[in-house]
Amino acid sequence: MSQTRILYTKPSITEREITYATDAAAHGWGERCYDYINRFERDFANWIGATHAIATSSCTGAMHMALAALEIGEGDEVILADTNWIATVAPIVHVGATPVFVDVLAQSWCLDPVKVEAAITPRTRAIVATHIYGNLCDLDALAVIAERHGLVLIEDAAEAIGSVYHGRRAGSVGRFGVFSFHGTKTMTTGEGGMFVTSDPDLYERVLTLSNHGRKRGETRQFWPAEIGFKYKMSNVQAAIGCAQLERIDELVARKREVFHQYQAALRAWPQISMNPEPAGTLNGYWMPTAIFEPATGVTREQLQAAFGREQIDARVFFSPLSSTPPFAAVPQNQLAFDLPSRAINLPSYHDLTPEQIERVVACLLSVLPEAR
Ligand SMILES: *Cc1c(COP(=O)(O)O)cnc(C)c1O
């Protein structure tokens, strides 16, 4: 019997996004060419709880500019989790710094603070805390370590919109935070990103770099003071972003609802664990992940085959970056190497139906002999 395919993510686009984008396309030119961009930056900063925001063409671009603004480069080391997306490390390499991959914690799949501290050398400049799949890093512990060693704490909150750490939104705690509005993320502008900070000097620096090195207040036309970047978001994309931001609470609430439905359906199976939500935090649950206990013997390959048969677009857990061709393997990052071999990411999007969730759960459990 043929079934409709279940995608792994899909944006939620309503009349509001269409109206704003249409308005930007029809009227957002000339004197109004920055209106939606300015509004999106202001409203996003407000919502996140940071003083400043700069909209960008991607999260990768936001990270690249901010690292350059901090003059992180040749000879510097930047610590990040081995469990990560390539976008987090590429800008570190682009500025000429050396990425140092450390292992993650068993519960959060995020940076292990003890391993972070052990990896610090006289060359270390920064720690990048990636909130993987919406799960929060131990920001208190990382902030203490950063402070003690004079390092910059950076948050990659690309996957963590809607996650809240002890009353503060993910991305607003570190020296700066970066977000992604790629089409697969909880809120989208198609492609896009955001840099946020509450440090006025860093903001000015990134603003200049983001403007091809032209300083604010420069009266000469076409007059760069230095080589900068061109990672800007367009007004039409920002219009979609404004509409998504007005719906952000609804978008996050739906992500949480989908997660809770999976969690309830899997509660009877302690051999499967999912994304944590420690006391004092909220998880935006960008991506619901199911991890099988080693004793089950369930493998990623079995899971991929089962989901493939059922026309469900479940995705593998990130392979450790150090295992990919651009880098040298760091096999002592045992959890980062082990977790992907017995995990799968489950579909989650706004319009996912209870019946589709049941289909995903049935497929997931089909690999467990005791559940059949
Ligand atoms: C999606 C993602 C990014 C990159 O976002 P782009 O907008 O595609 O540059 C960076 N880091 C993480 C952890 C991501 O999931």
Image (cartoon, rainbow, N blue to C red):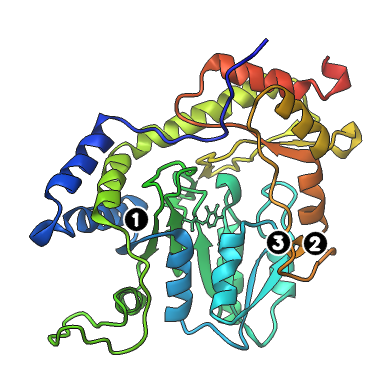
Vertical placement of residue 247 versus 28, above or below: above
Whole-percent x, y for residue 141 in the image: 61, 63
Label 1 beta carbon less than 8 Å to ligand 1 = no
Label 3 beta carbon less than 8 Å to ligand 1 = no
Mark 3 neighbour density, 10 Å: few (under 14) some (14–19) many (20 or more): many
Q: Is residue 357 left or right of residue 229?
A: right
| Label 3 to label 1: alpha-carbon separation | 31 Å
Q: Quadrant of the C terminus?
A: top right
Q: Which residue is mark 2?
A: 333
- Residue 288 numbered tag: none
Residue type at mark 1 is: Gly
- The structure residue drawn at horizontal position 31% and vertical position 47%, both measured from the top left corner, is 241
Q: Is residue 302 left or right of residue 156?
A: right
Q: Which residue is mark 1?
A: 49
Whole-percent x, y for residue 262 in the image: 62, 25
Which SS class for mark 2? loop
Labels 2, 1: front one: 2
- The structure residue drawn at horizontal position 57% and vertical position 63%, both measured from the top left corner, is 88
Labels 2, 3: front one: 3
| Label 2 to label 1: alpha-carbon separation | 34 Å
| Label 2 to label 3: alpha-carbon separation | 11 Å
